[in-house]
Amino acid sequence: MPPLLQVILFLLPCVAGTRASHLLEGLRLLKTEFALRLYRSVAAGRNGTNFVISPTGVALSLEILQFGAQGNTDRQLTSALGYTVHDLRVRDCLYTAYATLRNSSRGTVMELACNLFVQEGTPLSPCFVEQISWWANSSFQPADLRDPNSTTIQVNEGLSRQTTGGNPGDPLWELVSTMSAQLVLVSTMTFQNTWQRRFSSMDSQPLPFTCAHGLVLQVPMMHQMAEVNYGVFRDAVGHEVGVLELPFLGNMASLFLVLPRDKNIVLGLIEPHLTARVINLWTSRLKRSRMDVFLPRFRIQNQFNLKSILTSWGVTDVFDPSKANLKGISGQDGFYVSEAIHKAKMEVSEEGTKAAAATALLLLKRSRIPVFKADRPFIFFLREPNTGFIFSIGCVSNPLD
């Protein structure tokens, strides 16, 4: 078990309610650290391009595997996640946290789900089936994964159309190859909501954006003047960053933006110093401020090979047919993960909102109002307030990509 979680569990008070809150706080830090580790791994190979990844969705897949993992395979998964679902206290805490995410209201859709497509006729452990059936909206679906004439499955097509307006051909939900597989595990994260303080399409206009490699483009820039949560902080080596919180309707989630204050400081100098405790400190010390906010519209849709990322973290046995120990799934040898693919999508716009009373022309003249202008590469992350879990994290280097 990771040292941080060992300390958390050891220091828990005897009062049940306090114990649960302390454990959730510990898990929040561990999950935030997991999110930042994923971010850095992806950013290292993106060469200044846009990307988004869902740490919560990735973690859900690994948790499902943990239920069936044993021996060294389980230890490697635990090391990657920072916690284990085999600890009953952790399991109960996560189950409660995931249950709160199923409550959608006021036009909000916030959902985690995991579909396990199982080769027809494959024996499964009753204990594994029972554990997964109540874990974060998970479900089993039998499928003929070996039919050479039908070697693909459609991932969550209905949910895609319902929540994102997507079509069966939407790249985010494109077909996943299943040839020679026994079990395909697909986790999805869905979030849809409108801003608490709405941007006006009337106030959007083309403004300069300096891309990661110095190219200056005219991009559609949204604008609003509003009371927001904002703070200026220094990282471990003294770089100043501005952190802005934009809440969604009903405070169901918030989008946080991290922008270096000095235009000459690139994100690559900030990223190594981001830790869970730093993020927690920054977000907890934001203060209300009336500001002019400029944010480019952007849409990011990408796919990652998680196998290479996890392997670089030391998670190797689960991908090796000769070493994988997933006997908890079926009670038999032979299960291993051949591929691990993660797809994510993020879209930020003023679409679906009503116009504000003021116009951009008037607002742009208000020189005494503090300004947050995301006119160069920035980091963003979407966080749910009750659990503190980071649903999505990514980087915008070119809003037009």
Image (tube, helix red, strand yellow):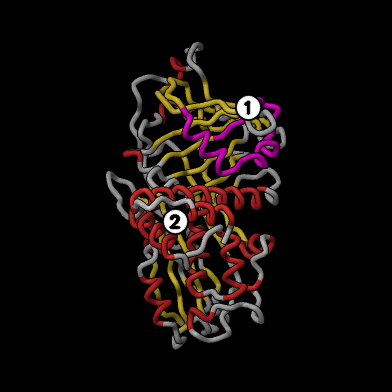
Q: Amino acid at mark 1?
A: Glu
Residue 125 vs 184, above or below: the answer is below
**Residue 322 vs residue 399: left or right?**
right
Quarter of the image where one finds residue 352: top left
Residue for point 30% across, 45% down: 107
Image quadrant for the N terminus?
bottom right
Residue 202 vs 377, above or below: the answer is above
Q: Position of residue 313 (x, y in %)?
A: 66, 60
Mark 2 lies on a secondary structure that is strand
Q: Circle 2 is placed at which residue position?
A: 189
Mark 1 lies on a secondary structure that is strand
Residue 267 among magenta residues: yes
Q: Circle 1 is placed at which residue position?
A: 240
Crowding near the residue tagged with mark 2, few <14, some 14–19, many ≥20 C-alpha atoms within 10 Å: many
Residue 243 among magenta residues: no
Crowding near the residue tagged with mark 1, few <14, some 14–19, many ≥20 C-alpha atoms within 10 Å: some
Does residue 338 appear in the picture of this structure?
no
Image quadrant for the C terminus?
top right
**Which badge, 2 or 1, comes first in the chain's sequence?**
2
Q: Nearer the viewer, residue 71 or 169?
A: 71
Q: Which mark is residue 389?
A: none
Residue for point 35% across, 43% down: 252
Q: Amino acid at mark 2?
A: Met
**Residue 215 vs residue 74: left or right?**
right
Does residue 121 appear in the picture of this structure?
yes
Region in magenta: 258-286
Residue for point 42% across, 59% down: 167
